[in-house]
Amino acid sequence: MLLENKTAVVTGASSGLGLAISRDLAHKGAKVFGLARRKEKLAAARADAGANFVPVVCDITDESDVARAFDVIQKAADSLDILVNNAGLGRFGALDSLSLEDWDVQMATNLRGVFLCTRAVIPTMKAQNVSGGFGGHIVNVASVAGLLGNPNIGAYNATKFGLRGLSESLMKEVRADGIKVTCIYPGSIETEFFERAGVPISANPMTAQDVASTVLHVIEAPDNYLISEVMMRPLRPAG
């Protein structure tokens, strides 16, 4: 896809990987609607990513908030070409000591939010698929935790395994409508994710910019070329 004058929506766009992806898309000429809950962080992201970045305050776990946000986007944009479901969080701990709140917030953000945002874009992307053409591209940011279970991250594993299954199912549902679906599985990335999760990060993580460059490569692939899954890891995580 050529990104000039395309419209993208990125969730969790105010920091980390979401900001890096938004910045790269904007610099390539796409109009990027960046969704996040923190208004002040979105303002900083706008200053970082430039004039092509449009901040949209939105809680992706709230159905009415998502509907409002996408109504704003569709009124402001001529198309809806890219959705990057990047927003996610982790709350780690043994399953028998994990609170229901910690379980629910991961399910809500990592799965419900993806469902709500994806459901919002599919009708427009299907309508853009004219005469067997190209409708759009949905990129879901999972994790290597969606491929391998480990102790003390069971709830997070469940959401990312679930996102893997959702992505594969959706890919098969909408590919005939000219819509690409890609699921990516990054390992440790140097972002605030680990600080907010309250667990240490590996000594030598990937950078958000490294992973964003791969996401851009996937999105810029030719229209009839579908990269459905990508796994990425630090070469030497221990340094």
Image (cartoon, rainbow, N blue to C red):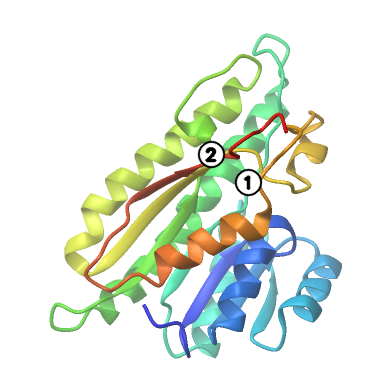
* Spatial separation of the CA atoms under disc 2 and disc 1: 10 Å
Looking at the rendering, which quadrant does residue 153 occupy? top right
Give the residue type that dot 1 points to. Answer: Gly
Residue 182 lies, with reference to residue 19, above or below; the image says: above
Residue 99 lies, with reference to residue 40, above or below; the image says: above
- What residue lies at 28% left-to-right and 45% top-to-bottom? 169
* Figure quadrant of the C terminus: top right
Q: Position of residue 163 (x, y in %)?
A: 44, 41
In the image, which disc is placed on residue 17?
none
Q: Residue furthest top?
A: 96
Give the residue type that dot 2 points to. Answer: Ser
Q: Which residue is mark 1?
A: 88
User: How many other residues sit within 10 Å of disc 1, few (<14), some (14-19) or many (≥20)?
Assistant: many
- What residue lies at 37% left-to-right and 43% top-to-bottom? 166
User: How many other residues sit within 10 Å of disc 2, few (<14), some (14-19) or many (≥20)?
Assistant: many
Residue 97 lies, with reference to residue 59, above or below; the image says: above
Is there any visible trace of residue 84 in the rendered image? no
Q: Position of residue 218 (x, y in %)?
A: 41, 63
Relative horizontal placement of residue 110, taking residue 124 as reference (left or right):
right
- What residue lies at 86% left-to-right and 69% top-to-bottom? 40
Relative horizontal placement of residue 65, taking residue 44 as reference (left or right):
left
- What residue lies at 16% left-to-right and 63% top-to-bottom? 176
Q: Which residue is mark 2?
A: 143
Q: Residue furthest right?
A: 40
Q: Are marks 2 and 1 in contact (CB under 8 Å)?
A: yes
Q: Earlier in the sequence, mark 2 or mark 1?
A: 1
Task: Indicate the secondary structure of the residue bearing disc 1.
Answer: loop
